[in-house]
Image (cartoon, rainbow, N blue to C red):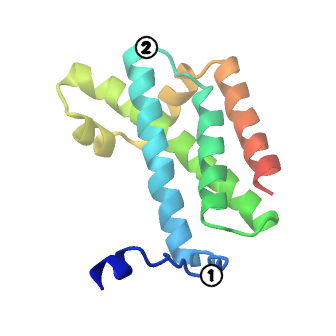
């Protein structure tokens, strides 16, 4: 009897399309993923000493992949979500790079520098640090997010 149970054919559940994730969950996932890719971007930039604007395109592709993974229907909402997630990643990365770049010489840890940096000072540091090439990469990333996100 035991042998018969062990050799019984394995039946899989019928294929059913998975339902898309709910709206608040998708927004939470986009926020976490954007901050995560922004943190990776900041680490790469701080270790190399450059802004690495090309990482914005990676952030856009990551947002698009996440939205498709969550089965968000194609259309303007998915494109808007991809653009928003890319913009959050760009802002988070640039803020982190500016804050940590200023905090290390002052003896502050990354988190202390991140929360103590003022908006006006951060804006000035970000505009001074980003070259025209970095700004072009960021603009291209927003276009990629809008076009491939639909």
- Residue 90 in percent (x, y) is at 56, 40
- Residue 91 in percent (x, y) is at 53, 42
Quadrant where the N terminus is found in the figure: bottom left
Please give the name of the residue rendered at 43% of the width and 24% of the height, measured from the top-left corner: 44
Please give the name of the residue rendered at 48% of the width and 66% of the height, measured from the top-left corner: 28
105 versus 23 height, above or below: above
Q: From the image, tell me which residue sits under label 2.
A: 49
Horizontal side of 111 relative to 74 (left or right) equals left
Q: Which label is found at residue 14?
A: 1
> Secondary structure under badge 2?
loop
> Secondary structure under badge 1?
loop
Asked if residue 122 shows in the view, the reply is no
Quadrant where the C terminus is found in the figure: bottom right
Q: Are marks 2 and 1 in contact (CB under 8 Å)?
A: no
Asked if residue 15 shows in the view, the reply is yes
Horizontal side of 56 relative to 146 (left or right) equals left
For marks 2 and 1, give the CA distance. 53 Å
Please give the name of the residue rendered at 63% of the width and 51% of the height, measured from the top-left corner: 65
Q: Residues within 10 Å of mark 1 (few under 14, many from 20)?
A: few
Residue in the foreground of this view, choosing between 48 and 6? 6
- Residue 93 in percent (x, y) is at 47, 37
Residue in the foreground of this view, choosing between 15 and 140? 15
Q: Which label is found at residue 94?
A: none
Q: Residues within 10 Å of mark 2 (few under 14, many from 20)?
A: few
Give the quadrant of residue 72.
bottom right
Residue in the foreground of this view, choosing between 15 and 142? 15
The furthest residue to the top: 49
């Amino acid at each position: 009897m035991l042998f018969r149970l062990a050799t019984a054919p394995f039946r899989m559940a019928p294929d059913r399309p998975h339902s898309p994730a709910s709206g608040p969950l998708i927004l939470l996932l986009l926020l976490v993923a954007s901050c995560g890719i922004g943190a990776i971007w900041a680490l790469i930039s701080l270790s190399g000493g450059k802004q690495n604007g090309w990482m914005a395109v990676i952030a856009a592709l990551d947002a698009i992949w996440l939205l498709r993974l969550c089965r968000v229907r194609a259309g303007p909402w998915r494109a808007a979500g991809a653009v928003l997630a890319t913009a959050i990643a760009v802002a988070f990365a640039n803020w982190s790079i500016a804050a940590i770049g200023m905090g290390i010489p002052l003896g502050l840890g990354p988190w202390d520098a991140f929360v103590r940096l003022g908006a006006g000072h951060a804006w000035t540091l970000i505009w001074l640090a980003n070259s025209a090439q970095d700004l072009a990469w960021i603009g291209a990333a927003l276009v990629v997010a809008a076009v491939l996100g639909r």
